Amino acid sequence: MKNKKIHILILIILIILIISLIYFFLIKKPKETENIEEKVYSSSGIKFKSNNFFQKVSNEKFDLSYIDPLNNIMVLGVQETKKELKKMKLEINSLKDYVEALYKKQNNTLTDIEKRNNYYYFTYSYKTENNEEFYYLIAAYETNDNYYTVNFTCPYNEKDKYTSALLELADTIKVT
């Protein structure tokens, strides 16, 4: 029963990601290609910093939703309360348990879970029905009352170009 609930949760997140990525590629890109001064982007207790130009995207399924259309990077974040997860009878007692639950439900090409600074992360690739492939870096964070999943995404063919940039973005995440 608990595996089914986790599976449903992960499936919902994946569906939302796919819809968001489709929307992402339909947005008109800004004309200027210069980086801007470092700016803080935030929503629902999740913040990140970047010198790149990010646009907020309206998406009811995510608490944080931004795109950098010049670099084809998307940042999506979800907050889950520890109380909600306990009501679902999930045995998640730590940030590592939380990220392992996310990890186990992926049916894609995965890397191992890594610990970095104050978060855990893993990466995977996903191919859409249209045969478009995307690279995901999934980072998990924690506060006293909440867990946060932040998805950093780019086209798979640009993975090597952006992996270090995605990790740098993940390093700037602050949750409250």
Image: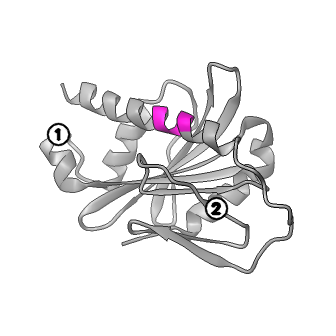
Q: Residue 94's x, y, as percent?
A: 28, 54
The magenta stretch is 15-19
User: Which residue occupies the foreground of this view, 158 or 27?
Assistant: 27
What residue would you read off at disc 2? Answer: 55
Q: Which residue is mark 1?
A: 88
Q: Quadrant of the N terminus?
A: top left
* Colour scheme employed for the rendering of this structure: one colour
Amino acid type of the residue tagged 2 in the rendering: Gln
Q: Secondary structure at mark 2?
A: strand
- In the rendering, at what x and y percent does residue 153 appear? 63, 46
The residue drawn where x is 20% and y is 39% is: 90
Q: Position of residue 141 (x, y in %)?
A: 41, 60
Q: Nearer the viewer, mark 1 or mark 2?
A: 2
Q: Who comes first in sequence, dot 1 or dot 2? A: 2
CA distance separating discs 1 and 2:
34 Å
Q: Which mark is residue 64?
A: none
Point out residue 80 in the picture as x, y percentages from the top left corner: 30, 53
Near-viewer residue (170 or 35) = 35
